Amino acid sequence: MKICSGRKYHEATKHSWLSVRQNPNRLDWDNQPRSMKVYPPSFPRIKLQKGFTAHNFIYHIGGITAKKSYPGVEYYLRTNPSAGALYPNEVYFQSRGVEGFVDGIYHFEVASSSVTLLHELEEKEGLEPLVGFAERMKGLLFFISSPYYRSAWKYRQRAFRYCLLDTGHILGAIEAGSYIYGHAYRVVYGADLEGLNRFFGFSEEEFFLSTAVVAVPQKGGEVSLPATTLKQSDPAGVFMSVPSIEEAYRETVKPKECKKEPRFPHFTLNKKVWEEAILKRRSIRSFSKRSITKMEFDSLVERVNLPVPSDCDEPLRLYAVVNRVEGLRSGIYRNGELVKEGDFAQKAGYLCLEQSLGSESAATFFILSDGCNYRPLYQKAGIWGHRLYLMAQYLNLGCSGIGAYYDDETREFLGDKGMVLYALAVGR
Ligand SMILES: Cc1cc2nc3c(=O)[nH]c(=O)nc-3n(C[C@H](O)[C@H](O)[C@H](O)COP(=O)(O)O)c2cc1C
């Protein structure tokens, strides 16, 4: 029998009408973790500059694009959305032969829009062996980690789901930026993440969740791991271990019996408008209840369904509760096909923990899967979510991710026994 990872964790972290009332979240504001990691000033830094294509590319993957001020607090918003704006991820990369960077291993310091050089590479050194490459790779290798307590501080056990979705959004940002940068990308889920954790000096407070490759092999370029390891720097200021999350990580860290997706997503978009969409993307906070057109709806669904190149592709299903789409009957659609006609707007809002975003949208999407590799399938849901956000922005529509929904009631409503991974609302 096939053994599927993450099932126990997923089951234990479902929301229901009762569970959210029985376990209301009380937040310890005096002990909120920091959402930005900064290495000590002794490390050299390179300020990201507009003149270098590769610098722009890095900035597109999580750079700060807006500031919100409330009495006594300031929030910095980024190119990527994040559940509760807690940003439980850090981006590291290896650069080899890329203009604007000396060959080395870097941390993207979001706070200062710069990168910190953690280790300069000797010619035959590199992290390639940990990603599964026997030769040197020219270009950029990305490593996405999660200091998970940033999210667990608020969402407790359910936070691992958000860490995975947010990682997927960062992978989606890499995909979106690589289109402008002009290089193919692919996700590698089968990298030796535990080896990477050791190399970066992490203990349980931060762990790697994904890697992505925007690089090509250098023929005959032997490579071996640097002889040293790196020194960890406190990623969040506050940490409290959540054993169920650490167990879910250990259980999902090594994918099994994976199916490769070799195809790249080919799309033709206006690059200037696309870049504006990347930089302007925000989560819509309320809808005007005006309709979108069938053409807009079709573009969203088409975009989501493009292949995600990776070494471990799991099938996902995209449902849409269509509330206000001109030229389309209201009802439940599965991968673009009507499966049940009716006005389910109120129901969709109720399922999203009574958030009006779900009922006032033009369409509320739900992503489900019964795949076996929990970490890859959840990140793919985040990539799909990022595609929806950016395509909506490109079409001048609004979008919001919705990580809070009644799991079992959503499955029953959709008539699908899979795991509900993510919801997103799109409209005007
Ligand atoms: C995984 C995920 C889950 C989210 N869940 C909700 C939600 O349930 N309700 C909501 O209003 N916004 C939700 N959001 C939107 C975030 O609140 C938003 O991304 C964050 O405040 C940052 O703002 P920005 O997206 O405008 O940059 C979610 C975003 C993500 C990525």
Image (cartoon, rainbow, N blue to C red):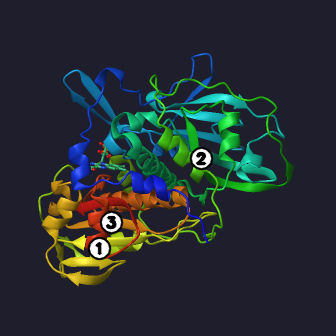
Residue 14, how many percent across, how many down? Answer: 35, 54
Residue 128 in view (yes/no):
yes
Residue 399, how many percent across, how many down? Answer: 27, 57
Front in this rendered view, residue 277 or 256: 256
- Contact (CB < 8 A) between labels 3 and 1? yes
Label 1 sits on a secondary structure element that is helix
Report which quarter residue 188 is drawn in: bottom right
Q: CA distance from mark 2 to mark 3?
A: 27 Å
323 left or right, relative to 283:
left
Q: To which residue does mark 3 refer? A: 366
Compared with 7, 234 (above or below) is: above
Q: To which residue does mark 1 refer? A: 414
Q: Residue at x 41, y 72 (%)?
A: 317
26 left or right, relative to 64:
left
The disc label shown at residue 250, or none? 2
User: Is label 2's Cβ within 8 Å of ligand 1?
Assistant: no
**Which of the two marks, 3 or 1, is nearer to us in this view?**
1
226 left or right, relative to 49:
right
**Which of the two marks, 2 or 3, is nearer to us in this view?**
2
Q: Residue at x 26, y 55 (%)?
A: 16
Q: Residue at x 37, y 58 (%)?
A: 390
Q: CA distance from mark 1 to mark 2?
A: 31 Å
- Looking at the rendered structure, the kind of residue marked 2 is Arg
For mark 1, does the 10 Å Cα neighbourhood hold few (<14), some (14 to 19), or many (20 or more) residues? many
Compared with 427, 243 (above or below) is: above
Q: Sequence-wise, which precedes: disc 3 or disc 1?
A: 3
